[in-house]
Image (tube, helix red, strand yellow):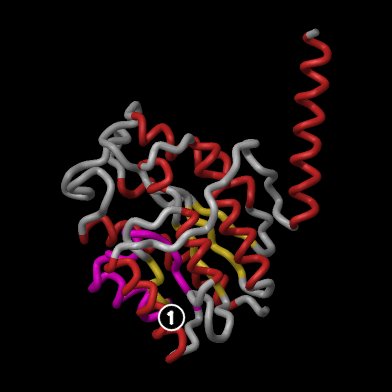
Amino acid sequence: MRLRETSLALAALLALAGNARADGLACPRFTGEPLAAPAPREAAAPLRRFEEIKQRLAEHPYRAIFFGDSLTEHWDPEVWRETLGRRDVLNAGVSGDRTEHLLWRLDHGNLAGPPPKVAIVLIGTNDLGHGRPPGVAADGIRAVLLKLREKLPDTRILLLGLWPRDAGPADRLRRETVAVNRLIETCADHRHVFYADIGAPLLDYRGELSRAISPDMLHLSAAGYARIAPTLDRLLDPLLRMPR
């Protein structure tokens, strides 16, 4: 019986690996769980933000687009202006978005206009906050990568690992972000998809997140964004210089 179970498990892994090769991503599906269907947000604020991103894309051909949730949308304005703003990056974050909401946006106008040289992706922490296990959250992120590769075949993707949340390394959501990052880093192929975990500067020497950096143990203060920005700049600049 154990031999049969092992054979079935191996067959399932081989099937997942085959799917990875077929769809062009370096990583296979991480679970066999069904994904949430792409869906729009219903609240007024995220819908207004969605329309604002569409409008800005219609008005200007950005060199890079930063897709995300509130961690992107509420980036400290001064830090953004002095770093990503100088690099002609569009802030395309929508507070509260989960992976299925970003997938819907990518199909309904938040990729309008000329394709950017780089798409930055930071999404999935709200999937964990919604109670999804790390494997399912990682599958949602993988689906976003797949959609971007389909829609923007010549655009390089900079996939960011989820940032630390909760106070200490043993806290549940902290452990889950680490688990997600270990999965999604396997999606990097160093040709189309590049992965980086830039969250370390947010933590002290004990691996703890302070209130000065993250007042609610999720969102960042201006000091937190100032710690993140230099590393992101160093990652982004070579990708912007690369020929298509």
Residue shown at the point (78%, 9%) measured from the top left: 2
Tell me if 107 is positioned left or right of 97 in this view.
Answer: right
Of 236 and 157, nearer the camera is 157
Of 33 and 125, nearer the camera is 33
195 over 33 or under it: above or below: below
Tell me if 12 is positioned left or right of 71 in this view.
Answer: right
Tell me if 78 is positioned left or right of 52 in this view.
Answer: left
Residue 66 x %, y %: 44, 68
Quarter of the image where the C terminus is located:
bottom right
Q: Residue furthest top?
A: 1
Quarter of the image where the N terminus is located:
top right
Q: Residue furthest front?
A: 42
Q: Residue furthest bottom?
A: 59
Disc 1 marks a residue whose amino acid type is Lys
Residue 48 x %, y %: 31, 74
Residue shown at the point (38%, 48%) measured from the top left: 126
Give the quarter of the image for residue 209.
top left
Residue bounds of the magenta highlight: 64-89
User: Dot 1: within a 10 Å radius of its alpha carbon, few (fewer than 14), some, or many (20 or more) residues?
Assistant: some
Say which residue label 1 marks.
54
Residue 131 x %, y %: 40, 37
Q: Secondary structure at mark 1?
A: helix
223 over 166 or under it: above or below: below
Count of labels shown? 1
- Asked if residue 19 lies in the magenta stretch, the reply is no
Residue 107 x %, y %: 55, 70
Residue shown at the point (41%, 41%) measured from the top left: 128
174 over 242 or under it: above or below: above
Residue shown at the point (21%, 56%) measured from the top left: 221
